[in-house]
Amino acid sequence: MNKLIERQTHLLRHLTSEAFIFGTDRLSAAAGDPDLRGMDVRRLRLEAEFSYNKRIKRIRQTFERTAALLGHGFSAITREFAALRPPETYERHPDAQRFFDHFMEHWAGKPPTPAWAADVAAVELALSRARTLRPTTMETAALAECPSHPPSQRYRTHPCAVLVRCGHDVRPLFEPGRSGEPVMPRPVGVAVLASRGRRRPTVMELAPEAFALLERSTEWSAPEPAGRATVQHLASQGLVLVRGNHG
């Protein structure tokens, strides 16, 4: 049994390798592996290419706007990603997270063209994350964890709010009717919210003080008097959960 598992592991390693996915000049050497004896290497290569195409299709669907911005550059990054980071899971969001990490490493020290592509990718990753969340279940669980001891007035960031710091205002690319507006270079705090009754997550800009409050309020706490108005405003947007009277 152990030998069978070991052989299957070697086979998967080949099927996710650059040689088999792209048919590089290393394919002949890889085909000489004893673990592949008796197997049709041509079929294995087709299977590797098919699996790669499915994986990259999911990546492109997740980072649709980023791919459109980068054009052929996005294809080059996906190829590099597949060669360096074989799949650890076939779940969409975890693989999207790994691609985003690779994307940021790829552009470290040399901003992409356009420069705001990294911000667009960050928002698209947040949207991917928000789609995996279950607002009703997570909100109920969070409220159940609220301490019952004083103070009676408490709040916390909604567990379905995903926060993103951007160096450019990329909201026109995500808001209906604004696609023709220019992307401006300025710091923007964005919240991506999965909420009850909405099929798609909401993308919204936050004032700096509101964004900072959400960042530091992932656990239940009592609102400071000076921050109560901000808490109430964020609660009205669904970004904050509130327990007790904050009037």
Image: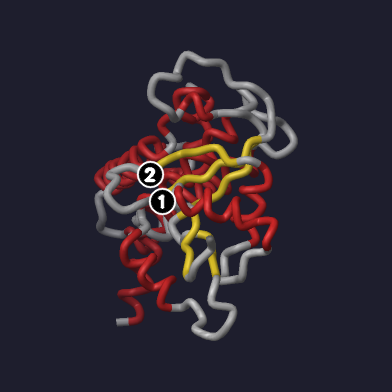
Q: Which residue is drawn at 48% across and 77% down?
A: 146
- Is 108 on the left or on the right of 246, as rendered? right
Disc 1 element: helix
Dots 2 and 1: beta carbons under 8 Å? yes
Q: Can residue 100 be seen in this view?
A: yes
Quadrant for the N terminus in the image: bottom left
Q: Which residue is drawn at 36% across and 51% down?
A: 195
Of residue 190 and residue 228, the one placed in the foreground of this image is 228
Disc 2 element: loop
Query: Please, which residue is most extreme toward the top here?
Result: 180
Q: Which residue is drawn at 55% across and 37% down?
A: 205
Q: Can you tell which quarter of the image residue 175 is in?
A: top left
Amino acid at the residue labelled 1: Ala
Amino acid at the residue labelled 2: Pro
Q: Can you tell which quarter of the image residue 94 is in?
A: bottom left
> Mark 1, residues whose alpha carbon is within 10 Å: few (<14), some, or many (≥20)?
many
Q: Can you tell which quarter of the image residue 23 is in?
A: top left
Of residue 85 and residue 30, the one placed in the foreground of this image is 85
Label of residue 223 in the image: none
- Is 197 on the left or on the right of 225, as rendered? left
Can you give x and y, in whole percent of width and height, for residue 38 in the image?
25, 58
Would you name the residue on which mark 1 appears?
A: 130
Query: Please, which residue is most extreme toward the bottom here?
Result: 149
Q: In this view, does 173 lie above or below 152?
A: above
- Figure disc tally: 2
Of residue 150 and residue 2, the one placed in the foreground of this image is 150
The disc, 2 or 1, on the residue closer to the chain's N-terminal end is: 1
Q: Which residue is drawn at 45% across and 23% down?
A: 68
Would you name the residue on which mark 2 appears?
A: 201
